[in-house]
Image: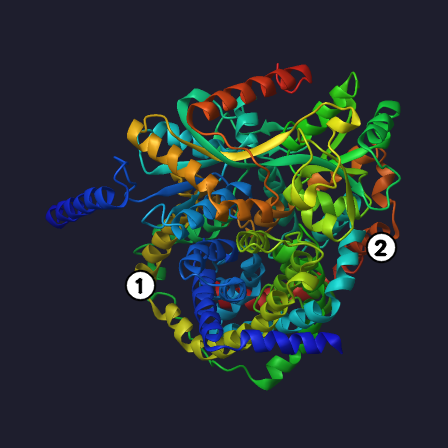
Amino acid sequence: MSHPVTLKRGIAATLIVLGAATAAPAQDFAPESPECIAPANPGGGWDFTCRQVGKSLQDLGMIDKTMQVVNLAGGGGGVAFAEVVNKRNDQNDLIVAASTATATRLAQGAYPGNTRDQVRWLGTIGADYGMIAVAADSEVETLPQLLDMIKEDPRSVSVAGGSAVGGWDHLKVLIAAQAAGIEDVRQVKYIAFNGGGEAVTQLLAGSVQAFTGDISEAKGFVDSGDIKVIAVLSPERLPGEFADFPTAKEQGIDVVGANWRGFYAPGNMSDDAYNFWVDTIGKLYDTEEWKQVMAQNGLAPLDLQGEEFEAFVADSVGSITEISKEIGIIK
Amino acid sequence: MDVLASLGDGFVVALTWQNLLLALLGCLLGTIMGALPGLGPSNGVAILIPLAFTLGLGATPALILLTSVYYGAMYGGRISSILLNIPGDEPALMTCLDGYPMAQAGRAGEALALSGIASFVGAFFATWGLVFLAPQLVKVALLFGPAEYFALFTLAFATLGGIASTNQAKAAFAAALGLGLATVGVDGQTGVPRFTFGEVHLYDGIDFLVAIVGLFALSEVLIFLEHRGTDADVTGRKIEVGRIVPSWSLVRSCIPTMGRTTVLGFIAGVLPGAGASLGSFISYSMEKRLVDREGTFGKGDPRGVAAPEAGNNAAAGGALVPMLALGVPGSGTTAVLLAVLLALNITPGPLLFQNNPDVVWGLIAALFIGNFMLLAMNIPMVGLFTRVLLVPPRLLMPVVAMVSFVGIYGISGSSFDLQVMVGFGVLGWVLRKLDVPLVPVILGTLLGNEMEANLRRALTISDGDWSVLVGSPLAITLWVIAVVGFVLPILFGKVLKRRMRMSRDEEGALTD
């Protein structure tokens, strides 16, 4: 039985050498069976990241084989993180979808025993900026108005979001409240729903007064005129059809909240492989096709690869740790 | 009739050879996936996404393939429920209650055919509901705030009495056990992990599928091992397959049931977060309350097979309402379908009907086509399915065990889930020994999470003011139904009980 297997391996290895030699002479590495772990069930942002990137890479001929997408749900990404660290630490064909939620949980110690430096961070494929919205018929027109209401009577405003308490959707509101001078931000009423969709529905149903989420979650409802975005948490106004939304910053509340989307890789991935993936993700980001995907899905530019991205994640984990401590989510 | 014209356009889109073949493929694969324990509609759809992408399908053909799988899996789930007493997926849970006793009584063929017809009726009329009522129904979904959801889930529990078991205390114990299991995992309202023992695999709570496969399939295997070599093994299960086509009078007797449960299931499907499981559950328990005068439900009453099947297939159609009209998934499967829409560069949301009419109407037309295909495929195949019963247990049980392990590992790729599954298998075996019904355990787990979350959401919004729970006419109505559903059987219980005892005596002679 072992004979055919080794033979097959041998042929495959030869093919890869040939493939690498012909297709991309500059690369010393090409994935034999590229695999992307989406650390959640199908249907969420991480799943989208894996599938869309896998599809685009193949369409553009940047990888020869189909990217295998594996959904490894559990523990808000913790199961996948632990699996990569413990069992698949030296695999070169593997990338894992990540986002601000990953950084948030790492910062809050929600992946028991795991830390940021156990994996190698590859790069981003864009960012979904946070936004705060109210129902179309709400009296509230601006972010300061909403925050004033909270300041006056925190019990009068319920904010709905798709993440659990302490999660990214929650933190966004708290950061904004903090910037607006609300002292005890823990008083802000946040109602956790299972995903942005359910939260928006409750905003439309009138159960809650405001919604915190990402631009992509709200797009459909903004187009239909059911909700109005009172603030985008981006450094400047977003391009294209999103340009109408005012930023929090221009309303005097200096807050930026980007939900970046990107990838990490196993900690012992070879340098050749690491460089290949960093390079490939960077190249994909620069294509026209990807710009289109970003525009259609409400992703804003955020172009970080390799060391730059490592530093960015370190920074992001640091600042989330600080905020979480301040507001008492972790001690 | 704008709607019919649009639907006509949809059929023009859907009726191409490629699309028909995709629908056929989807229905076939879906039925198989639904029937295999562990693989449900949402995994089935997720597994086929790469296929849709690799084939380079456009938006409409891809959706046709995937929704056929969805409807197919909803049909398929009943097969293993009826033949093996192992639900193929969560919504097929209730079908075990009467489907398996029917099979044991030598009426497997009838049960399969009847449930196939009920599935068709549920899905067919739900699809019409989707065509005509989608915009209006969205407004119904918007009437449900956290307080109303809580009342709805309480209603589901209030009518729980009497399902599966003749011993109410044991049913209540089982439901409480399920509710307890539901508390495992990170609590969304505080972000605190509960009963996880630092084990990251438990942070998301216990997966229903793992629990179902363990409780039903593995415990069945354990029971078999226990009786190995005894008389029961030697004589085997001498089960007759019975007639395959149900008599017209049987089908006719189930028509009112199918009608009522289609409506109930459809409404449950429309509500985001309620879904097909609640649809089949409420359908069954309401129907039992309404028509079960002789206490035959749970002992192989054909109406008890028709009710949950019409209910859960109608709910599958209903779940497409919030998905298409709001862009909000009403169930796990529609969440996956939404993701596919996004990947195909279609923005789901309130404007989907206006912006992508070809996709929406092509999809709806495909649902009709798929539904007829499924009926045509399922009825003749009943004869084939029932052959499973002729397989001796000593061959069948190892296959069940293998499919369970492969299925669960295939979904999560985690050996931890296998351990949990084995744990549930042992628990199921113990509960069976104690004659505690298994269905309420799953229902408690399934509904407990949402019930708790909605109660706490409602109370957080109202700052701890409990009166919010009866704050709207809808909530009050739901409470009234819940109370009536709970109290009436107690008041009239004496009469019922006497009748039940009589019928139990008869049945006891059959089963033991």
Kindly identify which numbered label has been placed on residue B477.
2
Q: What's the residue type where badge 2 is placed? A: Thr
Q: Is residue B94 above or below residue A113?
A: below
Residue found at x 41% / y 45% = A70
| Front residue of this view, candidates B96 and A241 | A241
Question: Left or right of B61: which side holds B221?
Answer: left
Badge 1 and badge 2 both on one subunit: yes
Q: Is residue B119 above or below residue A228?
A: below
| Front residue of this view, candidates B231 and B17 | B17
Residue found at x 53% / y 78% = B15
What is the crowding at mark 1: few (fewer than 14 residues within 10 Å), some, or many (at least 20)?
A: few
Relative image position of residue B127 (x, y in whole percent): 65, 70
Q: Can the viewer see residue B375 in this picture? A: yes
Kindly identify which numbered label has been placed on residue B234.
1
Q: Nearer the viewer, mark 1 or mark 2?
A: 2
Q: What's the residue type where badge 1 is placed? A: Val
Q: Looking at this rendering, what residue extends furthest in the left direction?
A: A3
Q: Is residue A327 above or below residue B111?
A: above
Q: Identify the element where label 2 is drawn.
A: helix
1 or 2: tag closer to the N-terminus: 1
Question: Is there a contact, CB below 8 Å, between mark 1 and mark 2?
Answer: no
Question: Left or right of B399: which side holds A155?
Answer: right
Q: Identify the element where label 1 is drawn.
A: helix
Rounded to the nearest angstrom, the CA distance separating label 1 from label 2 is: 55 Å
Residue found at x 75% / y 53% = A224
Relative image position of residue B233 (x, y in whole percent): 33, 60
Residue found at x 45% / y 78% = B242
Relative image position of residue A108 (x, y in whole percent): 57, 21
Question: Left or right of B246: which side holds B406?
Answer: left
